[in-house]
Structures are given as C-alpha cells and as structure tokens.
C-alpha cells in the first residue's frame, strides 16, 4: 500500500505497511481502486453532461463514494467493494445511454472481486511515476474529497448545486489526462473557488434548517441517566437522534466534531441534550470506554475500535468499521431508525464523569456580525490588535502542543478564531475576554470554516480595505485530513497569503509543488512558538 493523504502519513512520507490511522493494506487497495473507478465514471459522466443526460444523482454518488475514502471515515472492506461495484454499474449504464466509447482502461475495467487486489496494486498513487504530476493530481483529489464531504452534508439537508457536481466530475476526469502543469495548477485553484461555493451551500443548509449558531455555554459534565454519544459531523443524524430519544429517559451528548451542535437553536431546545463529553477524535478509545453507553459515529474520525466498546459503537452514513452495526440510510421522505441504539442505551450505566464545567462557543458568522460594532470598536481602540485564525484539525502528534502554547503565548490583545477539532488544544484554557468578547471564538465544526472566511471578508468591507491581507488577521492552521486541504485551497482562492501550516507540511506536496505554494502564497511551516507569535503579532 501507499497512502500519504493525511498529516500523520508514516515518517512524514507515506504509510506503506499499514496506516497510522488503522487502515489496513487491503482496505487501502480497495479505496485506491474505488477512486480509480470514480475517475472512469467521471469521464463518462462528462460525456453524459455534454448530451444533457446527466442528473444530480451521479454527482451525489461520487461525493458519497469519495467521502468513504477520507481519512478515518470507512474501514469496512465490504462497503468499499459495494461502492466499487455500484460505480462500475453506474458507469456502464451511462455508457449505454450515451453511446460512449473509448479504449481507456479507466472507463472499461470491470473486474470481479477476486481481481480487486491485483488491480488495486496497479492503480494506486505511485502508479504515476512523475512526482510533480502525482503531487498536483493528489492535491486536487484530496481537495475534491474534502469538497465531497461538505457537499454530501448539504445534500442530506436537501441542498444541492449542480455546478459543484459538474466541477467535481470534470476535475476528476481531468486527472486521467495528460494536462500541462499550468492546467493542473489551474484545476487546483479552481477547486478552492468551488470549495467556497460548497462551504457556503453547507452553511446555508445548516443555518436555514437549524438556525444560526449563538453564544452558548456547553456543559462538559454528565448526568445520572444512560446516554448516547454522537460524534462526526452530520447534523441531520443529530436532529433525528434527538427527536427519537426525547422522552425515553436516555440523554444525548456530543463528542469531538459534534460539539458545535450545542450551539444551534433547534438542538438547544431539547432538555435531554446534556452537552459535550470528551475531546478530539484521537482520544476516543479512552473516552468511549468511560462513556459506558452507545456511541454513534456519523462520519470521520473513527479510530480502531476497542473491545471495551465494540458491542456499543454504531456507524451510519459513509462511516464504517468492519463488524460494527451500521444504521441504514433513511428511506425517501423518512428518517433513520436509531431505535436499536436507544434500546442499547437503556441497558447501559450512566457515563463516568471525566471533567466538569462549561466551554463557550457559537461564534459562527451571524453571531460575530451581531457583535460587529463591539468588535470593530475594539479594533479601532486598539483593544484587539490581532485575530489569529487557528482553525483545522487535531491529531495524535505531540508536536501539536505547539497550538496550545501559541494560544497561551499570544498577548491579551489577540483573539483566536477557530473551527474544527483543532480547538480542543486550547478551548478549555481560561484565556479570558476583551471587553466581553471571548479570546477564543469558536465558529463550529471544520465544516463551518466558511464562517471564518465570511467574517474576514466582512471585516475587509467594514475597514474599506482593498486587500484581505491588510486585515489584522493571521492564519496559523492545524491540518490533518482532506477537509482541511480544501479549506486551505478555499483560503488561497480568497487571496489569503502568509498562512502558517502545521504541525508538518503535507507529504503529498513534492518539492516543486511546495515551491509554487511558497512563491505564490507565502505558505510556511510552523516554527518555534515564541518566534511565530512575535511574527504573527507583527503581521508577518
Ligand atoms: Fe477533526 Fe477528523 Fe472535522 Fe477532520 S474529527 S480531523 O476528519 O473532519 O476535523
Ligand atoms: Fe496513513 Fe493517513 Fe493514509 Fe491513514 S489516511 S494510511 S494515516 S496517510
């Protein structure tokens, strides 16, 4: 196997024996084969589009299948095999309806299961010998994976945009062709542009369905009832779980990236929605053990399932772990059925309390704009000297303590804007406030990173600046998986420069591609805490 799509790629170059994430060689091969076949489907879908024979279902299917290959999303070989078969079946149906004909293997391969392993070995990342072409193609594919996740979440709430699907199809198809370096870079930057559309669509889907997130104190302690812990990012699952647990005597808690569900008016109204339990995804083995009750994984990040909770963890949507009960899709017009999880919860003891107190969040764009006068006055008076966007992901590497130390080292007149599970490195520190504005403003999930871009663009308007880089905002981003990749591309599209990225730069950037990013956007790796903080405060 060879996989280098996330920040924890072994030795900073790539996982070759087994994934640091727990992905086994056979699963890695199947995911490679799935991506290969999705490229073939995209090539035929392009033809169908040109003949006006393409409907949204193909775009959504591609999103969901790509979503299954995101880091820590789906480790279940059987599910990946089913996706491969469906991809080939959809491709062949489109070929028939369009009369598409080509000798290319990528649009013709239809091996049976026993041939999957051998084929996977031929079509993986290293099948492209040129390291710069490989780097640009994979950068694009990882951006598309991130976009796929956002687009799928929006679709689950009934929000779809054909332009996003069409870009994804043409970009994926483009990875099968010999494009010039300029064309490939163009596709990567276009991915950032379409990512802004996808993130805005998801924002609209979330806020028009569940209301605008608002300042909220989230309880991090527990009650004495049995509980269900819900993790991942899918808000539709959150809604249905809250509805189905109401009046059952079972409480609901969020874990990791589901924490921001606590900020939505539509969810806050449930008395049995108690708060958040635990920290970022990578601490789940300990926290799922002490939680005692069932856990519902709606998306990434899943870590290798431990015996201590194997019989009480469930997946749904594109998430999967072999041997774990998977809650089926909702039927058209209906709901998912979480009754099995609720019954399980009733037989479990209440969670063990691992901490007490509250954390404050809910600073998505509408809430920050509601405070705009206060924020602008604070900037004008000099009470706020700098905003530091520290959004992104958390992860296992001990070097991520850098982000905790930066949060502590930043002077009292700096405000941290965050989103994603990166926040767990500093959201329980007491960093105080500036005239009532907390020094850590959490906009929500990594899926809500759009809010941070929106806030920056609004501030640019308010301060009548021509260049987004003239704002008193610095970017010190923690990345881990492919959603962070697409957020980074979105920021580049918006013209943001001088981004610090850590804890390490992506393994999939070849030296030449990294050079392009450095020369054009001044992207830089994180350095020493004190030096970085001084540079950040000096606007460098
Ligand atoms: Fe965190 Fe994991 Fe949000 Fe990423 S829970 S690193 O894949 O999606 O962020
Ligand atoms: Fe390794 Fe990351 Fe790929 Fe998992 S997703 S196999 S940890 S590079």
Image: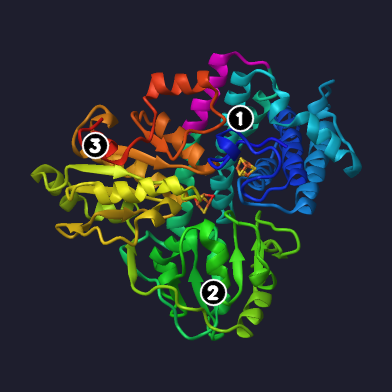
Residue hosting label 2: 290
Q: Where is residue 295 in the image (x, y as percent from the top left)?
A: 59, 69
Residue hosting label 3: 461
Q: Distance between the residues labelled 2 and 3?
A: 48 Å
Q: Is mark 1 on a helix, strand or loop?
A: helix
Please state which of residues 152 and 384 is positioned toward the viewer in this rendering.
384
Q: Where is residue 170 in the image (x, y as percent from the top left)?
A: 63, 28
Q: Distance between the residues labelled 1 and 2?
A: 39 Å
Q: Dot 3 surroundings within 10 Å: few (below 14), some, or many (20 or more)?
A: few
Q: Is residue 536 magenta?
A: no
> Which residues fall within the magenta stretch?
178-193
Residue at the (61%, 84%) spot, across then down: 346
Judged by depth in the image, the label closer to the viewer, 1 or 2, is 2
Q: Distance between the residues labelled 1 and 3?
A: 35 Å
Q: Can residue 420 be seen in this view?
A: no
Please state which of residues 530 and 115 is positioned toward the viewer in this rendering.
530
Q: Quadrant of residue 348?
A: bottom right
Q: Is residue 184 magenta?
A: yes
Q: Where is residue 205 in the image (x, y as percent from the top left)?
A: 48, 53
Is 514 rendered above or below residue 423? above
Q: What element carries label 2?
A: helix
Of the two numbered discs 1 and 2 on the same chain, state the one appearing first in sequence. Answer: 1
Quarter of the picture containing the C terminus is: top left
Residue hosting label 1: 138
Judged by depth in the image, the label closer to the viewer, 1 or 3, is 1
Of the two numbered discs 2 and 3 on the same chain, state the one appearing first in sequence. Answer: 2
Quarter of the picture containing the N terminus is: top right
Is 42 rendered above or below residue 295? above
């Amino acid at each position: 196997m060879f996989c280098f799509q996330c920040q924890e790629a072994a030795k900073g170059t790539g996982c070759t024996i087994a994934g640091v994430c727990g992905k086994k060689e056979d699963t890695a091969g199947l995911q490679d084969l799935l991506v290969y076949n999705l490229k073939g489907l995209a090539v035929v879908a392009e033809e169908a589009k040109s003949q006006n024979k393409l409907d949204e279902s193909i775009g959504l299917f591609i999103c969901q299948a790509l979503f299954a290959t995101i880091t820590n999303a789906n480790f279940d070989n059987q599910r990946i095999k089913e996706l491969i078969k469906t991809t080939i079946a959809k491709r062949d149906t489109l070929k028939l309806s369009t009369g598409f004909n080509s000798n290319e293997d990528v649009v013709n391969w239809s091996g049976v299961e026993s041939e999957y392993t051998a084929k996977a070995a031929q079509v993986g990342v290293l099948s492209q010998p040129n390291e710069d072409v490989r780097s640009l193609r994979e950068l694009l594919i990882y951006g598309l994976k991130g976009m796929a996740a956002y687009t799928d979440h929006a679709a689950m709430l009934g929000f779809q945009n054909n332009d996003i699907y069409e870009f994804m199809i043409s970009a994926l198809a483009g990875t099968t062709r010999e494009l010039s370096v300029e064309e490939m870079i163009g596709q990567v930057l276009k991915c950032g542009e379409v990512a802004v559309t996808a993130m805005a669509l998801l924002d609209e889907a979330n806020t028009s369905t569940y209301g605008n997130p608002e300042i909220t104190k989230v309880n991090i302690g527990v009650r004495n009832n049995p509980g269900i812990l819900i993790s991942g990012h899918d808000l539709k699952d959150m809604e249905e779980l809250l509805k189905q647990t109401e009046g059952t005597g079972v409480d609901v808690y969020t874990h990791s990236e589901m924490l921001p569900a606590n900020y939505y008016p539509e969810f806050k109204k449930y008395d049995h929605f108690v708060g958040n339990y635990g920290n970022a995804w990578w601490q789940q083995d300990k926290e799922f053990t002490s939680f005692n009750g069932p856990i519902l994984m709606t998306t990434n990040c899943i870590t290798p399932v431990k015996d201590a909770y194997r019989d009480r963890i469930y997946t749904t949507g594109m998430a999967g772990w072999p041997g774990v009960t998977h809650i089926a899709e909702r039927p058209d017009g209906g709901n998912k059925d979480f009754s099995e999880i609720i019954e399980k919860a009733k037989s479990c003891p209440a969670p063990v309390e691992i901490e007490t107190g509250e954390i404050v969040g809910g600073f998505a764009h509408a809430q920050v704009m509601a405070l705009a006068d206060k924020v602008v006055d604070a900037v004008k008076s000099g009470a706020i000297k700098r905003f530091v966007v520290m959004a992104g992901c958390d992860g296992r590497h001990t070097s991520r303590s850098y982000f905790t130390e930066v949060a502590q080292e930043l002077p009292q007149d700096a405000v941290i804007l965050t989103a994603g599970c990166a926040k767990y490195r500093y959201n329980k520190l007491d960093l105080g406030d500036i005239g009532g504005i907390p020094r850590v403003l959490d906009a929500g999930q990594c899926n809500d990173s759009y809010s941070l871009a929106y806030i920056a663009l609004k501030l640019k308007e308010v301060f009548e600046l021509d260049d987004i880089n003239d704002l008193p905002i610095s970017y010190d981003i923690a990345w881990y998986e492919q959603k962070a990749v697409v957020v980074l591309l979105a920021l580049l599209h918006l013209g943001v420069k001088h981004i610090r990225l850590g804890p390490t730069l992506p393994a999939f950037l070849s030296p030449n591609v990294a050079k392009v990013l450095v020369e054009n956007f001044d992207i830089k790796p994180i350095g020493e805490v004190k030096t970085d903080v001084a540079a950040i405060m000096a606007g460098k």
